[in-house]
Amino acid sequence: MRERIKNLVREILPELIDIRRHIHMHPELSFEECETMKFVSSKLQEWNVSHESAFAGNSIVGLIGDQNGPCIALRADMDALPMQEKTNVDYASKTDGVMHACGHDVHTTCLLGASYVLKRLEKDLPGNVKLLFQHAEEKLPGGAREMIEAGVLDQAPQPAAIIGLHVHPPLEVGKLGFKSGMFMASADELTVVVQGKGGHAAVPAEFTDPIIAAASFLTTVQQVVSRRSDPSIPTVVSFGQIETPGGSFNIIPEKVVIKGTLRTMDEGWRAEALKLIETCAHQVAHQAGCTASVHIIHGYPCLINDTELTNQMSVLTRELFGNDSVVELPFRMSAEDFARYAERIPAVFFRLGVRNESRGITAPVHSPYFDVDEEAIFYGASTLAWAAFSFVSR
């Protein structure tokens, strides 16, 4: 069966590459994936894969196999990023300011490839595979939450587990990366507004300077979080934007707006750290004679890979491509809304190598120069199909 799956993927790979390039040339932002949805639906219809479009927005849910058997879900995201592509490839984005710079075009193509294969093998499939082509991974609240709220994990057949993948430029094409347990961080958006009394910079004693208070907060909050956190729990507090509306070289502004993120890998500590950040902002501002307000947008939770399922996936991948194909990965402080599924059912999120240094394909994700070695589609589609078939055959 392993060889049948790989042969079927190899057979359709030229078409899959065309599919990926079409999606890449026509990227759509989160919550706007209407044409991508229609295109994916047209391929599923062509291959006689039963599916429902416009699920919870612009997502698609497909189904292959015997609904009376065990069920596993496979998920791929479809949205692009607000970036201008600079690759100069002939399949570059045709939409100004929008680009598939995070590989979601590859994820969607890999799942389409797995769908084609599993449909061809449907008579031999002793269970069923639920296909989740998801909208809006890149933007809160995220398509995963909307799909879950719409019942994608509860509607029959209910998947007992879920598998997802993501391109990984540090890995050479042909390599697949796994990490059981804590894998990706939670991500919350923080906006801290320090309010003071502005005026002429030549007479600061007459005013309450929010810039000084903001600077003190930025240094103090790092100490508070690092001194209060368990060293075994990865934690990052980073601030990437400071605004001083109305301020200038000789004007103390009325307020300072600071924007940043908290990322960690423990939900209990996450809640505590957010409270500490808020308390720190109020105390530091008060000491400087200012006031502070803190607005928190709760983002994606920690992504925890199920240990048993991850180990099974690692074994299955070695069976498919050999021992050298599997790489043990460290955890990452980036976030992913696949974590929503992992909160509900056993899940594994793995990484797909796309790097090819000999061809200059080395740019990281979220880069305007990002591209992939399209041979990675063969590995991604084959792995998804083989894992799904093996799971429902147990």
Image: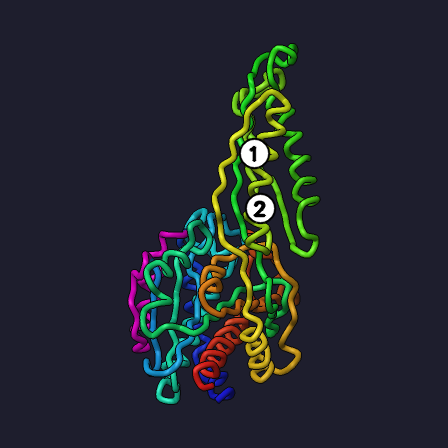
Residue 376 position, x and y percent, is 54, 71
Q: Quick check: 142 above or below 245?
A: below
Asked whether 189 or 13 is in front, the reply is 189
Which residue matches tag 1?
258
Residues in magenta, as a range: 30-57
- The image's mark for residue 61 is none
| Residue 35 appearing in the image | no
Asked which quadrant contains residue 68, the reply is bottom left
Q: Mark 2 points at which residue?
A: 272
Q: Residue at x 67, y 45 (%)?
A: 228
Image coloring type: rainbow
**Is 186 one of the magenta-colored residues?**
no
- Callout 1 amino acid: Ile
Q: What element carries label 2?
A: helix
The residue located at (40%, 57%) in the rendering is: 145
| Circle 2 Cα neighbour tier, 10 Å, few/some/many (<14 / 14–19 / ≥20) | few
Mark 1 secondary-structure assignment: strand
Percent coordinates x, y for residue 353 in the rendering:
59, 68
Reply above or below: 89 against 165. Answer: above
